[in-house]
Image (cartoon, helix red, strand yellow):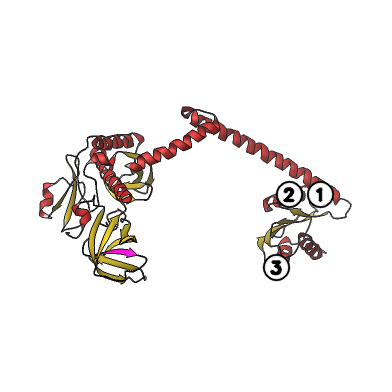
Amino acid sequence: MENKLYYQDPYIRTFNAKVVKQEQDSTGSWYIVLNQTAFYPTGGGQPHDLGTLANKAVKNVEEIDGEIRHYIDVPFDDIGKEVIGTIDWERRLDHMQQHAGQHLLSAAFDHLFGYKTIGFHLGAEILTIDLETDHLSQQQVQEAEALANQVILENRPIETKWVTEEELSQYNLRKETKVKEDIRLVIIPDFDDNGCGGTHPRATGEVRAVKVLDWERQKKKVRVQFVGGNRVVTLLGQKQRVLLELTKILNAPEKEMEQAVLRLLETNKTLEKDLEQTQESLLHFEAKDLLEKRSHREKPLVSEVFQNRSIQELQNLARIIITEEETAIVYFVSENDKRLQVVCARGQAETVSMKQVIASALPHINGKGGGNDSFAQGGGEALVSGEQMLQHLLEIVR
């Protein structure tokens, strides 16, 4: 472990090391191996560090086959020389805060309710832990969060120890360790003993705070979303900005925001219903007008070319017409930008197969569609004009 400087001191930001190996992996990506490194590799639910080596950006860090690989875009011209490594400190500190926050929250759920953590993920914005339970209440979340934050406020030390498998019996481990040698314990006195290979701050006070955001049941576990450290302050600032904008838009104070939104949603539902009824009435008037224009024919053939009408509108209009007039045949075409929409329908008294009509028409526009003998629809590219398509439909029926 001597070459893993992040275990000796997770606060190291710069270090010197020698390049001992430079190769490409199976994907063709270049990586280098150093004689010692402060770059933390992906592992234990914690993402890898970022930074630079000799001013070359380190894009990824992985521990593979016992060596820590630092992935770079451009290989070094000369290996074997000493290089300066610089850690992205803001990212490292964030990971330290989040990982320690996870230990605190997991231990709180365990102490209070006996809920074991069976999964952990440290994401770019939020963290999740999976609790071994199928139920979690608001009261339990508040109690666990309060306990974790109380331990943060007490600023207890966060200790790390390397122990053997035989020495594990001396500690009250929250869960069994997966490794059997080079066992590293992260200890928060009188609160949490846990096997962990991640980086953590020196004391709980550096975590600043933890805040649970949400939780959901997933099969036989509950997934809890939360943030810790500087992310709490950042997220509070984001949410506050959004809330202040909403108070201006809705003209309501923060405490009345929920009721203001509910009133707005209810009003919107009413308006949508009124709009639907109005649109339905307009379609009936339009259908009546189209039928009257064709009333001089023995069989009212209703055909029309529209501009920018949705196929749903054409379908509804056609259904109204064939309901009003059972001898009607309806051919509608709509020109929508670079596409054509086609609807064909017949009343109950007619026998022309609309399915065959649409099947004959769609190849002219490389279209797709379907339906049955009484009602069919489709659409395709505007390879012909709407009038040309309508004339083709009329030729078919003749």
Secondary element at image label 1: helix
Foreground tag (3 vs 2): 3
232 or 54: nearer the viewer: 54
Q: Is residue 141 above or below residue 29?
A: above
Whole-angstrom CA distance, mark 3 to mark 1, is 28 Å
Does the stretch in magenta take in 83? no
Q: Main secondary structure of the magenta part?
A: strand
Q: Secondary structure at mark 2?
A: helix
Q: Bounds of the magenta span? A: 66-75
Residue 363: image tag: 3
> Can you identify the residue that label 1 sits on?
290
> Given the image, on which type of amino acid does mark 2 rest?
Leu
For the N terminus, which image quadrant? bottom left
Do labels 2 and 1 touch, CB within 8 Å? yes
Residue 37 seen: no
Between 378 and 200, the one nearer to me in the picture: 200
